Amino acid sequence: MVKHIPWLFYLTGLAVFLLDQVTKYLATQGFFPYTTNTGAAFGILQGQQWFLIVVGLVVIGVLLYYSHEHQLALGFLLGGTMGNLVDRALSGFVVDFIHAPFWPSFNVADTFNVLGVGLLLLDAFARRKR
């Protein structure tokens, strides 16, 4: 994957977090339609805010522990996790504003979480083939 660059993990995480929060703010100010989700992906675990907050904090701890590896992918995951965690902690729900046909609504944080996992999977498959 990407060669080790000091601070890439933190800068990527911060950039994703800020982009996520700005876009959610714009959605809630009426720039585009949005929905709220008190659960996790695909609406599972509705109303389990404390559990989801604890899981988010644990995920951030694990990402920080491994931050020296796969910095870009883990930075994407850090920013996405922090974005949704802040929403849950402050509002009790996550703002979703990207609407695609035949798919539940999602947001920038969700997008970068998927990209981060995708990069990790691509790297794992590439290493396996060597």
Image: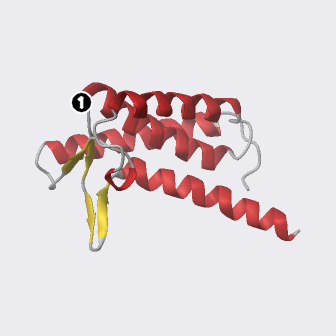
- Quadrant of residue 48 in the image? top left
Quick check: 27 left or right of 3? left
Q: Position of residue 95 (x, y in %)?
A: 25, 44
Q: Quadrant of the C terminus?
A: bottom right
Residue at figure coordinates x 72%, y 52% from the top left: 2
Residue 25 in the image, given as x and y percentages of width and height: 22, 40
Judging depth in this view, the residue of 12 and 97 nearest the camera is: 97
Residue extending furthest toward the right: 130
Which of the 4 image quadrants contains residue 126?
Answer: bottom right
- So how many labels did they put on this image? 1
- The residue under label 1 is 91
Q: Out of 61 and 51, give the one closest to the viewer.
A: 51
Is 15 placed left or right of 129 in the picture? Answer: left
> Label 1 amino acid?
Ser
**Label 1 neighbour load within 10 Å: few <14, some 14-19, many 20+:** few
> Residue 24: horizontal and vertical position, in percent?
26, 44
Residue lying farthest to the bottom in this orientation: 101
* Residue 68 in sight in this render: yes
> Looking at the image, what colour scheme do you see?
secondary structure
Q: Secondary structure at mark 1?
A: helix
In the image: residue 113, left or right of residue 74: left
* Residue at 24% in and 54% down: 97
Q: Quadrant of residue 58?
A: top right
Question: From where the camera sits, is residue 15 visible?
Answer: no
Q: Residue at x 73, y 36 (%)?
A: 68
- Residue 92 placed where, x, y %? 26, 31
Q: Is residue 89 left or right of residue 82?
A: left
Quadrant containing the N terminus is bottom right
| Residue at the spot 74% in from the left edge and 42% down from the top edge | 69
